[in-house]
Image (cartoon, grey):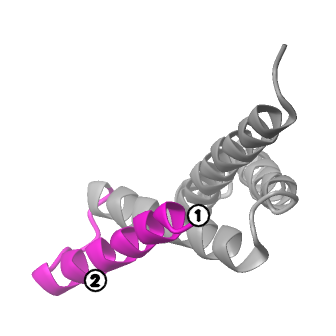
Amino acid sequence: MESIGTAREGVYAMSWLVLFFAGALEISWAVGLRVHNGRPLLIGLTVITAISSVVLLGVAMKQIPIGTAYAVWTGIGITGTFIAGALLGDPVTASKCLYTALILAGIVGLKLSS
């Protein structure tokens, strides 16, 4: 039989997984804004991923402190969108890579300090 502490830890860990997926959807809708080119299906998918991202963020915030959850969510979105933009031809400089790496380090630091 699982103890109450272990069950809470499992819920907390699941909240981090939900937050990760919320961040992934953040990347998806940001990229969707760029690539939809007026196609109704892609516009619809972009709207669905934006709403889903925010809903999952709200779910994660039930267990993860609001400041930490929001910072991690936006950090995942920033980092992933930067990488996606680079793959789509956005200019990449050493300073952009450095500052994106600092954001990623902040995300890791927030997770480790939680």
**Vertical side of 33 occupied by 1: above or below:** above
Residue 98 image point, x, y percent: 20, 80
The residue lying at 87 percent from left, 35 percent from top is 4
Residue wearing tag 2: 99
The residue lying at 33 percent from left, 60 percent from top is 83
Quarter of the rendering occupied by the C terminus: bottom right
Disc 1 packing (10 Å; few <14; some 14–19; many ≥20): some
Question: Which region shows up in magenta?
Answer: 88-114
Disc 2 packing (10 Å; few <14; some 14–19; many ≥20): few
The residue lying at 47 percent from left, 62 percent from top is 112
Judged left or right of residue 52, residue 32 is left
Residue 106 image point, x, y percent: 42, 75
- Per the image, label 1 sits on a secondary structure element best described as helix
Quarter of the rendering occupied by the N terminus: top right
The residue lying at 38 percent from left, 56 percent from top is 84
Residue wearing tag 1: 30
Judged left or right of residue 54, residue 35 is left
Looking at numbered disc 2 in the image, what kind of residue is underneath it? Tyr
Q: How many marks?
A: 2
